[in-house]
Image (cartoon, grey):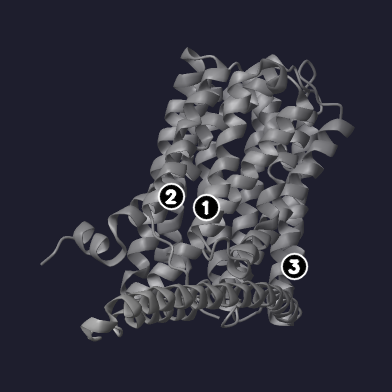
Amino acid sequence: MASWPARMAAAFGAPFLCLVCFIYFIQGFRSFVWTAVSYQMKDIMKLSPSTSQFLVSLAYFPWSIKPLYGILSDCIPIKQRKRIPYLIISSCLSLFPWIILGLSETLRSSSNFLTALLIVQNLGSAMADVVIDAMVAEAVRSAGPEFAGDLQSLSWSSMAVGGILGSLLGGYALSNLPIHVIYLVFSVLPFFQLVSCVFVEDSPKGFQSVLDEDKYLDGQSCVSPSAEKGSGESFRYEGTRRRKGTRKSNKRRTLSKRTEVNDKQNRSTNSWSILSLRTAFFSLCTAFKQPTILRPMAWFFFSNVTIPNISTVMFYYQTEVLHLEASFLGTARVIGWFSLMIGTYIYNRYFKHKKLRNILMFAHVGLAIIGLLDIILVSRLHVQYGIADEYMVLWGSALADAINQFKMMPFLILSGQLCPPGIEGTLFALFMSINNLGSTLGSFLGAALASALNISTPQFDNLALGLSVQLIGTLLPIAFLFLIPKEVTGLTS
C-alpha cells in the first residue's frame, strides 16, 4: 500500500504540493517580519500607539477585497492562463516591497512610503492566498473528494508550522539582527515562491477548441505537399515548381486561417471575460440579498466592528512599561498557535453539535473575560498576589487564541453551507472579506479610541478605560444574536 505522501504526489504532483505548502507556510511565517515592522514604527520612527494602529490597519485593507482577486483570476485569463500568471504577479508584489524597505533607509523611515509599500505587500499576499485556494479547490475536484481533507490538512499544517517558526525566530532575529536585514532575509521566501511558480502547470481550460483547430491546420499543411509525390519523371521539374507553389500557397492559407482564428479567439475571449464579470457580480448580488445569507453575515461583520482593537497599544505597553523582550513576545505567539489548534480540537470534539447561538455567546463572554484579564494587568492588581506580568500575558494570549476559534470555526462552517452552487469560491471569499473588513474597521475604531483617550508612549493612564470600552464592545454583539438562525448548530444548518 502506497504511503500518504506518495499517494498525494501521485494525485496532485510534487511541484503543486510544494507550491501549496510553501505559500501557506509563508502566510504563517509572516509573523517573523511583521514583528520587525511593529518595532520599526515604535523604536525607529517613534510613532504614537494610535498612529501605528492606524497605519497597520490601513496596510491590511487589501485583505478586505479578496473577492476582487478571485473574480479577476476566474474571468480574465492572462495568456490563456487563469492562475499561474496571477500567482506570479502576487509573488512580485510580495517580494519587491521587502527588498525596497531593506535597502532604502529613507523610504522605510517615512510613514507614507512605509504604509504604501506595506499595502502593496499585503495586496500580493492576499492575492496569492485567493489564487492558491482556487487552485486547491480545482485540484481536489479533479483528483476526487477523498483527497479534500488531506489537502486541507496539509495546507493548515503548513501555515501552523510557519506561524510557530516565524514567531520563534522573529524574536530571536530582533535581538541579533538589524531590522532592515530582517526585511531582506524574509524577502527570500517570496523569491522562492516566484521561482516555484515556473514548475507548476496551469492548464488553459476553455481554450482547447482553438488548440484542436490549430492542430488540424498543421496537419493539413503537412499533408498537402506529400500528395504531389508519384508524378512522372518527365514532369519532375514542373512538378517540383508546382509543389513549391503549393507549399507556399498552403502556408499562406494556414497562416491566414491561424490569424483569423487568433483574432476570433481574442474577440471571443474579451466578450467572454466581460460576460463572466457581469455574471459573477450579478450572482453575488442576488445571493447576498437572500435573508438566510445576509442576516448571519451582518452579525459576524457587526461583531468585529463593535470591538475596538487596541492590540498595537497593548504591544507598546508590554514593551515600554512591562519591558518584555521580543523573544518572550515571540514565545507568547507560539503558545497562541498551539492554543489555536487546541481550541479547534475542543470545538470539533465537544461544541460542534451545540446551537450556534450558544457557541457564539460563549465565545464573546470568554473574550470579555480575557479583556478583564488585560484590565487587571494594566491596573497592576495582580502584583499584590505575586503573579508575574509574564504569566498574565501568556495566559491571556493562550486563552484568547483558543476562544477565538469558537467564533471562527462556526463562521467557516456556516459560510461554506450558505454558498449556493456555482459561485462557492467567490462567495466564500466575499464572506471572508466581510469578516476581514469588520476586523479592519475595528482596528480603525481602536486607533480612534486611543487617540481620543490620549494614550501615548509616556502616558498609559487611560489604557484601562480603553480596555473597559473594548470589553463593553465585546459583549454588545450578544444582543443581536437573533440574526443567527435559531436551529443552526455548529456543524449543520
Q: Name the residue under label 1.
A: 87
Residue contact between numbered discs 3 and 1, judged by CB atoms under 8 Å = no
Separation of disc 1 and disc 2 at Cα? 7 Å
Decide: marks 2, 3 in contact (CB < 8 A)? no
Q: Is residue 7 left or right of residue 412?
A: left
Query: Residue 396 placed where, x, y %?
Result: 56, 38
Query: Which residue lies at the image location 68% right of the left edge and 61% below the top edge?
Result: 68
Q: Residues within 10 Å of mark 1 (few under 14, many from 20)?
A: many
Tag 1 near tag 2, CB within 8 Å = yes
Instruction: Report helix, strand or loop for mark 1.
Output: helix
Give the quarter of the image for residue 46: top right
Q: Mark 3 points at which residue?
A: 298
**Dot 3 amino acid type:** Ala
Residue position for label 2: 197
Task: Give the quadrant of the C terminus.
Answer: bottom right
Tag 2: residue type? Cys
Q: Which of marks 2 and 3 is in front?
A: 2
Instruction: Determine the secondary structure under disc 2.
Output: helix
Q: In which quarter of the image is the N terminus?
A: bottom left
